[in-house]
Image (spheres, rainbow, N blue to C red):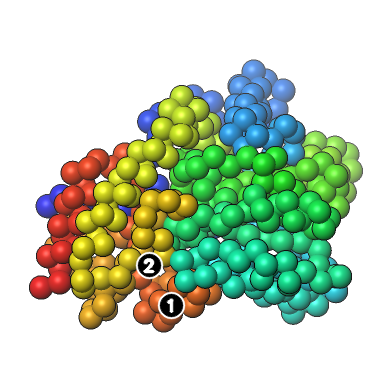
Amino acid sequence: MKRIYMDNGATSFPKAPGVAEKVYEYLMHIGTNINRGAYADAFESENVVFETREQLCSLFGFEEPENVVFTKNVTESLNVLLKGLFKSGDHVIVSSMEHNAVMRPLNRLESKGVTYSRTLCDSEGSLDLENFKNLIKPNTKGIVMTHASNVCGTILNLEEVGKICKERKLLFIVDTAQTAGAIKVDFKTLNADAIAFTGHKSLLGPQGIGGFMVKEQLASKIETLIEGGTGSLSDTEYQPEYMPDKFEAGTLNVPGIFGLNAALKYLEETGIEAIFQKEMQLTELFLEKLLNMEHIDVIGKKSAEGRTSVVSLDFKNADNGEIAHRLANEYGIMTRSGMHCAPSAHRTLGTFPRGTVRFGLGHFLEENDILYAADCIYKIKE
Ligand SMILES: Cc1ncc(COP(=O)(O)O)c(C=O)c1O
């Protein structure tokens, strides 16, 4: 049976060429920590870690490599940013398309006196900017939004949100889990104050490495979530206040950073635009085939415009979980069914509590894979 991986919305596979080799090289031939040893191999690790901060700056149009912080994923990054910034009495605005990586920390903060409002997106997952503006209150401190829906792929118009944040002097934090590496994400164009990313989705790196980048003036205002050894200022028992050490307590995932370094090199050489074009070409072909099928609904946008390559389907007269199971067992097609950690997005799209079958197309797939998947989706109605 064929084996076709279409769960790139959850995590990408395969990883970029060179990633596995770079992790192997580190584990077999380098293996040293950073900030802790004064020998050549320790400097080798330090150089790669710093180079990776610079690669991330170049990818996100950010200019302060020391303000690129490594964490284990975007969830941890969002926890650090949200819990470090918002305090009792603050009001926050999110969209109705958020992942639980935003909603769960916010609901925790709600029990500590932070309030939030959800701007309702339309049935395709797009933002309504008027509705958003009407939610701004005198105590609104910040906006936290996903750049694209992990359920249906709709890209949120965050450039406009960023402009409003700038005008109203609101903090703007962007969750780029679904866009980093898939479309151009530019810190300045978004008018962002902080961007959170995860290494294992479209950045094509390994699991367990992610991070955030934050403007210097904001970094100094964020309280730390964890404190501990940094290998720096070891004569004091207080957490350093300077970046990135302030937020990098404990030993970093250095093998993960080496892997991410190779992935970022691949993205730079290939170009985000070329990856985007390929993914959109596959998405367009997939949608064209799907829109002719009466036993399914395509959720969210029906064309390749304004979206990523995540496509969600509702099988009208069947259980979506069972369909995902059949696609895997009978046809070797790997997808994800259910709520995708975003119940509010499903409420917005009208798929709560049925959920959807989500296909995450990656640029390593070929047209034949898309035609095969469409054919299997057609056959599965019987
Ligand atoms: C929009 C969005 N935000 C956050 C996350 C969480 O990513 P991670 O598990 O890498 O922290 C995901 C991934 O599922 C996502 O799609």
Q: Is mark 1 within 8 Å of ligand 1?
A: no
Asked whether residue 222 is in view, the answer is no
Based on the displayed image, in which of its 4 quarters is residue 50 positioned?
top right
**Nearer the observer, 140 or 89:** 140
Disc 2 residue type (three-letter): Ile
**Nearer the observer, 21 or 63:** 63
Q: In the image, what residue occupies the spot 41% across and 81% down? A: 353
**Nearer the observer, 188 or 201:** 188
Asked whether residue 57 is in view, the answer is yes
| Residue position marked by numbered label 2 in the rendering | 299
Label 1: which secondary element: loop
Label 2: which secondary element: strand
| Residue position marked by numbered label 1 in the rendering | 350
Q: In the image, what residue occupies the spot 33% across and 49% down? A: 283
Contact flag, marks 1 and 2 (Cβ < 8 Å) = yes
> Residue 48's spot in the image, x, y percent?
60, 26
> In the visual, does 278 lie left or right of 344?
left
Q: In the image, what residue occupies the spot 74% across and 56% down? A: 164
Q: Residue furthest front?
A: 130
